[in-house]
Amino acid sequence: MPLSMLFGILVLMLILSAFFAGSETALMSLNRYRLRHLIKLKHTGAIKAHQLLQRPDRLLSLVLLGNIFINNFAASLATVIAIKLYSDEESIIAIATGVLTIAMLIFSEVTPKTLAAIKPELLAFPAAWIYIPLLKIFYPVVWFVNLFVNLLLRMVGVDVKKGNHDSLNKEELKSIITEAENFMPSRYQKMLLGILDLESATVEDIMTPRNEIVGIDLEESIEEIITRIKSSPHTQLAVYKKSIDRVVGFLHLRKVLVLVNQPNFDKQAIINLLSKPSFIPENTPVHVQMLRFKSEKIRIGLVVDEYGDVQGLVTLDDLLQEIVGELITDDVTVRKQNDGSYLVDANITVRELNRMMQWSLPTEGPKTLNGLIIEFMETIPESGTGIKLHGHPLEILKTDESAVKLVKFLPGK
């Protein structure tokens, strides 16, 4: 056989080796979720690639069978060519082996595999058309190889027949959504993250604390009650006697505002307009309470602890805000400064701060940043105090006798 033909066959072997090496990397690098999307769109290349990936043991056996055969054949050809060219040189075989190794490394391994890793679909889908018939032709050989391979894998507790069923847990899905900033506005990212957090959030995490509940005390004078009704920014108010633990019901301002200017308006008129109060256990999951609000056709309830004492108040708007966040509120709890620091209202919930800043402050204990700081320091700090809260440096800017009011998170972590 002439040298020109031998060189031609050797180049062909390098090309085939590049095909097997690149297609192997491409098929294994395919995004499984994009692959499923393309299958729904009836993409034939994606369908065939999916068929191959259902049994990766067979695919790898076929690819390596072809690649090893071609590499060995190429090595033999290089030896023959070297002997024909320099039959009197004893070291020529070693030199030919070294040159072939460098050539195969560059042209048949690194280059095609790098291309496949960057653009897997470019090589994987055309290769799938070739591998499907090749697998049928060489199935007896592949089956024989896999017989021993599967036996060895079973010895270490791996069953290849179960396949590789890709699934994502909640934290992995949250990471994907967080990294999708180029495909969706940040406010939609926060909505999706809020939906994923619904299952783990309870009404205690998002409720208005007991000391911030705005209501009507029936022990007050009628004039004070009317003033409170007219100045209230809320549509519903809790009505109680002396203490919020002795709640009577909820008053909808739309019903009462048309009556407050009448001369015979009194406390009994208020009582007649009250709706029955709804009590919610503090550990009730947010998504469960949303369904309860919907089924009972109510929008507000009081959160109680195991002793029946009122701990806070939660509304349907609070539950929706857990999902849509800043779309329905004017966010002033976190303000970014020019130096990269953040001024944060210490009344913000830890969950909301985590979601806004993409942090992972603990949520199992205190529900607000104020509570988290006090628990961490075991005292109410003075203004100007600096601490490192779970890896985040901050400075206490404003406090009062009972709570931290304003903090400054310093740039960086």
Image (cartoon, grey):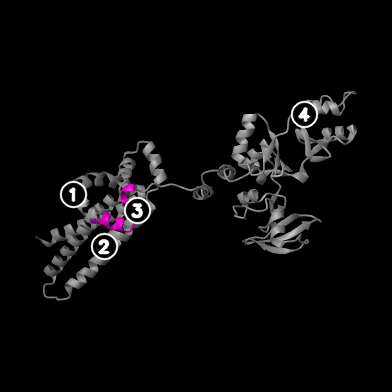
Q: Position of residue 1 (x, y in %)?
A: 9, 60
Disc 2 residue type?
A: Met
Whether the residues at callouts 4 and 2 have beta carbons within 8 Å, the answer is no
Three-letter amino acid code of the residue under disc 3: Ala
Q: Residue at x 90, y 33 (%)?
A: 223
Q: Amino acid at mark 1?
A: Pro
Residue 93: within the magenta? no
State the residue position of label 4.
Answer: 274
Q: Which residues are magenta?
A: 148-162
User: Which residue in the structure is indicated by mark 1?
Assistant: 140
> Which residue occupies 78% across, 62% down?
382
Label 3 residue SS: helix
Label 4: which secondary element: loop
| Residue at x 65%, y 30% (from the top left corner) | 296
For marks 3 and 4, the one nearer the N-term is 3
* Cα distance in 3D space between marks 2 and 3: 16 Å
| CA–CA distance in space, label 3 to label 1 | 29 Å
